[in-house]
Amino acid sequence: MPEKDWRQYARLILLIAVTIGFIWFVGRISWVIQLAVISLLIVYALHPVVVFLKSYLRFTHFASVMAAFTLFLFLIVVLISLIVPIIQQEVELIIKDFPHYVRQIQNYLQEVTEYLEALGLSEDYLEAIYNLTTDLQPALEELADISLSLLYGLVDIFFILFIVFYLLYDFENVRKAILSLVPQHHLEFGREVIRIVDRNVGGFIGGSIIRCTLVGITVGLLLHAVGMPHALVLGILAGVMDIILYFGPYIAAAPAVLLSLSPHTPSLITVLVIYVAVQVLESLILSPLVLGKAVKLKPITVIVALLVGQQLAGFLGLILAVPIAGIGKNLLEYYLQRRDGETGTPGS
């Protein structure tokens, strides 16, 4: 075999080996990557506060960072000291009453089964419907495992706080260091990439905080007003899950719908009306106002990005999918504009 072919095969084997090694290395440090990404998202949320304090109140850089970081710590302490104990009590009550909810759902499914039997459906369909109740207990056990994982995850908060403070302090220096690695003839492109990332990630995180907070408070207050038990937990769940565009509100509504099937709770129709009304108001008013400038993606693009993000990185992928898709779209638009400008073709 000619020496040239051997070199090509050697390069191909080396490329494959490097790729496999890189994937293995990323898998081994996935925990560190997750902490770094979460810290970066928090920094993007706090950085506007630092800029405001420096620009309008004439704080020094160190004082601005300390003030923003102290505000962040204060919010965490408030959440832990005031809200977490109440959430814990309500979650314990939900778990305690879970067998009652299971029996109630079994009764409803039994009624549905009897109705479907009258329609003459096959035994396979009837058995599948009846077996839904047997899946509820494993779901409860999985919920307990998730709660335990969240408890262990509190340890990660200390690492995140450490990373957030130093990254927030050196945020501008980090970006300058990244630009220093870019060749001079590509420097303008590097600056544009950073601007695009700032606009998409910063705008999405900041807008999502406002949007999710308002949705959580609104759902919690409305559920409390109609006498729904565990309204605080359900409101917080609605706010947290609302960060997932389109899918989040429906995921958050599922527990409320199940609870509404039991006695002494608002009717199923009332609960559905609350969630649908809040979702409509959010889609028509909140999202265009707080995310309109940051995320300009078609619904099908958002849905595909969410599905891909969930498969690649779970819940964190769901959060990052939309801003990453927005970054990709803006980079493509920038490339097309530069290409059209270089060829003398008017831009679209």
Image (cartoon, rainbow, N blue to C red):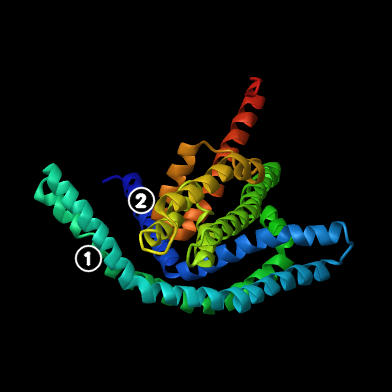
Kindly identify the residue that appears in the image at 54 percent across and 42 percent down.
280
Q: Position of residue 46 (x, y in %)?
A: 70, 62
**Label placed on residue 215:** none
The mark closer to the camera, 2 or 1, is 1
Q: Position of residue 68 (x, y in %)?
A: 75, 67
Helix, strand or loop at label 2? It is helix
Q: Is residue 162 visible?
A: no
Residue 321 shown left or right of residue 288 in the figure: left
Kindly identify the residue that appears in the image at 82 percent across and 70 percent down.
63
**Are the two marked residues, 2 and 1, in contact with CB atoms closer than 8 angstroms?**
no
Chain-order first, disc 2 or disc 1: 2
Helix, strand or loop at label 1? It is helix
Gap between marks 2 and 1 measured at Cα: 52 Å
Q: Position of residue 26 (x, y in %)?
A: 44, 64
Kindly identify the residue that appears in the image at 69 percent across and 53 percent down.
179
The residue under label 2 is 12
Q: Is residue 271 visible?
A: yes
Q: Amino acid at mark 1?
A: Thr
Q: Position of residue 74 (x, y in %)?
A: 70, 74
**Label placed on residue 134:** 1
Q: Which sits in the foreground, 309 or 77? A: 77
Please determine whether, in this image, residue 165 is positioned above or below residue 300: below
